[in-house]
Amino acid sequence: MTAIEVRGLRKAYGGHEAVAGVDLSIPDGEVFALLGPNGAGKTTTVEILEGHRRRDAGEVRVLGTDPAGAGRAWRARIGIVAQSATDAADLTVAETVRHVAGFYPRHRRAAEVIDLVGLADTAGARVRTLSGGQRRRLDVALGIVGRPEVVFLDEPTTGFDPQARRQFWDLVRVLAAEGTTILLTTHYLDEAEALADRLAVIAGGVIVAEGTPATFGGRATAGTVVTWDGPDGRRVEHTDDPTELIARLAAAGTDLRTLAVTRPSLEDTYLTLIGEAR
């Protein structure tokens, strides 16, 4: 089954086409990361999928329904963690989660969700007293309390410290293990690589590359860089066959203790794609 299906999606603001023909297909239970620079069309695309923004053209189905005309029953099946959220600052964390849980027919227990996002120690604290990272965790709690089948995570770990980010990654893995489909937008490439089954880069309103983290942008077949210390200093060689090069160096008696073999990182590939798109 396909959780999210997008064909020829377009959206313009004035004379600027923010989304210029996006195609996406995300199966049930997949963690899919949508990457791109600011202004590339990520947030507009996600807001259309959430039913919060009208499209100009194209076909969109989320859980088999067009979000533009979806009702309450459909909204109860999705979860949203937006870039920014408003909240009832005078309520406690527990009160806020229990209040929102009441809108969903098959919600999780408030205490369970609060523990999942790492706010158990602040369950009785007023929302207005939370730090930025804690408030972001509360946003995540509100997005998953209804046991959604599809979760939209728009820059979810902004403001998180490294430990909180790792805890959030564990939460995403728990949701994925339960069969939840997750669409993640993030500027953290290590986050995308750690969590996503597949990812895509959007630039200028179009998808410029798509694939698994390991094969994305031709990484799996990209040339290898081999470096080592030679008698005349540091040596660097680009090769498609590092095994042959290493064997040749070993046969020549080269000291291989400083040898390193690297392929393009996800960040390298991403920056190349963005540069080409620009």
Image (spheres, rainbow, N blue to C red):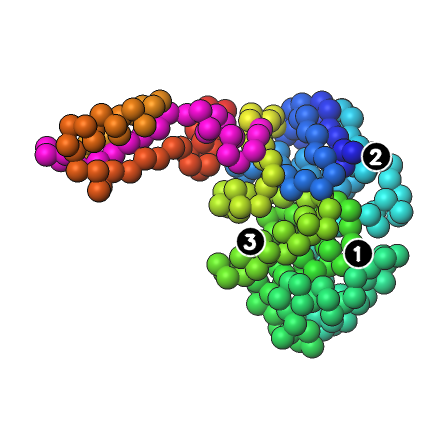
Question: Which mark, residue 158?
Answer: 3
Lower position in the chain sequence, tag 2 or tag 3 = 2
Q: Position of residue 166 (x, y in %)?
A: 53, 57
Between the residue at mark 3 and the residue at mark 1, the CA separation in whole angstroms equals: 23 Å
Question: Which mark, residue 37?
Answer: none
Between 135 and 64, the residue placed more toward the observer is: 64
Residue 214 among those drawn in magenta = yes
The residue lying furthest to the bottom in this view is 124
Task: Read off the residue under disc 2.
Answer: 64
Element at badge 3?
A: loop
The residue lying furthest to the front in this view is 251
Please state which amino acid type lies under the numbered disc 3: Thr
Mark toward the viewer: 2 or 3: 2
Residue drawn at (67%, 67%) of the image = 115
Residue extent of the magenta highlight:
210-233
Q: Please tell me whether residue 124 is drawn above or below residue 80 in the rendered image.
A: below
Between the residue at mark 1 and the residue at mark 2, the CA separation in whole angstroms equals: 19 Å
Q: Please tell me whether residue 188 is drawn above or below residue 263 in the rendered image.
A: below
Task: Read off the residue under disc 1.
Answer: 146
Between 240 and 159, the residue placed more toward the observer is: 240
Q: Contact (CB < 8 A) between labels 2 and 3?
A: no
